[in-house]
Structure formats: structure tokens, C-alpha cells
Image: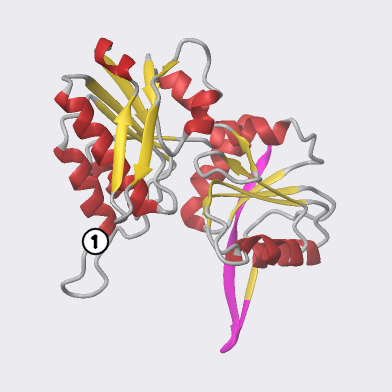
Amino acid sequence: MYVTSLSSKDTLRKLDGDFKQIECYFERFPDGEGYVRFDEKIKNIKEILIVQSLYYPQDEHIMQLFFMIDALKDLNIKINLIIPYMAYARQDKRFKDWESVSGISLAKMIDKFDIESKYTVDIHDMKVTKAMKGENLSAMPLIADYLTNLNLKEPVIISPDKGSVERAKIVADQMDAEFDHLEKTRISGDIVEIRPKEINTKGRDVAIVDDIISTGGTMAKACEVLKRKGTLKVLSGATHLLMISNAEERLIKAGIDGIFGTDSIPSKFSEITIAKIVEEVF
């Protein structure tokens, strides 16, 4: 399978030898407009996989994707698409009249292109993937592999809320570990207690897993609570590490023992590659 990317080249470099990379180049004109060009080898192929993650600057990466797709269409090349991190995916519903539902809007734009197959990875809400008639893949098995190699003590896998508990379950089942989710209980008008719903984590290691770490606020609060309850190590990880503002500082201050994630968004914490997901699908 031939493969190309502009935003996910680190992932492409980790693919096995069955994938042959076609270089794609991006330049910017003095007026700020972008320019995309493929290596001349592109003229000899029939089908290609685009791996294009839409992290910051997301609008630039989106336009790169559109230009790539359109250029390949002009060459009558069949296109498959994996979007490791889908921009705007948390904007999946209308809260105010007359506002754009940006995640659905972007998905509909992508669906307008005649693409053979479309995939997202650990999308925040499946409505977005469905809007572009695609399939969602999970990086949770890769996270389970990573955590297994850390030799954690009686590990407990925890999701930050009930909505993400299925992700924690996937990781825990593969590790043959227990899982739980954090529950908020209002003690008084201005006091809310956060704690694991059922499992006692005293004297055990915990890994908190989610689809996204954005500002790190939820993870930091969870870590503080777990540490107060006698938890040994607390690790914090997600498929997509946005790590905006001072997220790293906030997590370290809360006492986190480790941060991990995939290379869907490149960072110094991206120790897990989604290349394995690409290899399994194609």
C-alpha cells in the first residue's frame, strides 16, 4: 500500500516495509496561502492511503487534506483516509440557535469527496465519524500493551467519568486488571467529592485513560484525589494529547507519576505509535 501525509510523517516512518511512502510537500506563499505538491512517483500508482491528523494548526491541516485529496482525484487515484486526530470533534451538537456544529460540518465536507474508506481514531463522539460515513478505530489495545510493559502493582484502570468507562474496560480486559470510573458526589453547595465509584486503590497503581487530555484539569483533580486515598503511582494518558495551556505543569503539580499518549498528536509524551493500527487495517 502506498501512503502519504503532511501532518503525520512521524507515524509513517514507523510503518513496516509493506507501506511505500509517497512524499508530499507543503509550502506557504508570502501572502499566507498554502501550496501542496506530490513527488512525481505519484503518477504511477492506482491507490493510496492518506494519514492526516488534524491537530493545531487544525485549519491548516484541514486545507492540506482537501488539497491532497483533490490533487489525487485529478490523477484518478483511489483514496483511503485515516484521520488519527479529528479536529472539531468535540463540537458535535448545537447549544445555541443558528450556530455551526463544526464537527459535523467538517465531517460532511470530507464525505463530499469520493473516498474508498474513511477512519477516525478514538473519536470524541461517534456522531462525527458517522456524519462522514466512516469507521472509528481504537488505540486502547495499544495503550494496554504500553501499560502492561510497565509492570504496575495491582493496576486499576480508571476513566475520568462514566462516559469514558468503555475505554477503561478495553484496556483493563486486555491487561486482566480491574477498572472503574470517577464519580462526583455533591457534599454541600460548594463542595464536590471526586472518588473512584467502587474500587479501593490504596497501595495500588492507577492509570487514568481517556480519549483526550486538553488542559489536564480533570486528570489533575483525579490524581490529587487518588493520591490522598493512598494510591501508589498515578499515570495519566490518552490517545490524543492536546496538552494546551499549562497542562503538563498542572499534572506534575498534582503529583502525576507519568504522562503517556499516542503520536496522533506529536509530543514528547507520544510513546505509543498508531502505526500498528494502520498496519492492522491495511
For residue 70, side relative to residue 237 (left or right): left
Q: Does residue 49 lie above or below 136 as drawn? A: above
Residue 261 image point, x, y percent: 60, 43
In this rendered view, identify the residue nearer to me: 195 or 251.
251
**Where is residue 247, by image quadrant?**
bottom right
The amino acid type found where label 1 is placed reads Val
Residue under the image location 39 percent in, 46 percent down: 54
Tell me where the magenta segment starts and ends, as one range: 175-192
Q: Does residue 188 lie above or below 281 as drawn? A: below
Residue under the image location 24 percent in, 40 percent down: 66
For residue 101, side relative to residue 201 (left or right): left
The chief SS type of the magenta part is strand
For residue 56, side relative to residue 217 (left or right): left
The total of numbered circles placed on residues is 1
Magenta residue check for 132:
no
**Quarter of the image with the C terminus in it:** top left
For residue 235, side relative to residue 197 (left or right): right
Magenta residue check for 190:
yes
Judging by the rendered image, the residue that carries numbered circle 1 is 101
**Quarter of the image with the N terminus in it:** top left
Residue 45 image point, x, y percent: 27, 12
Q: Is residue 274 visible to us here? A: no
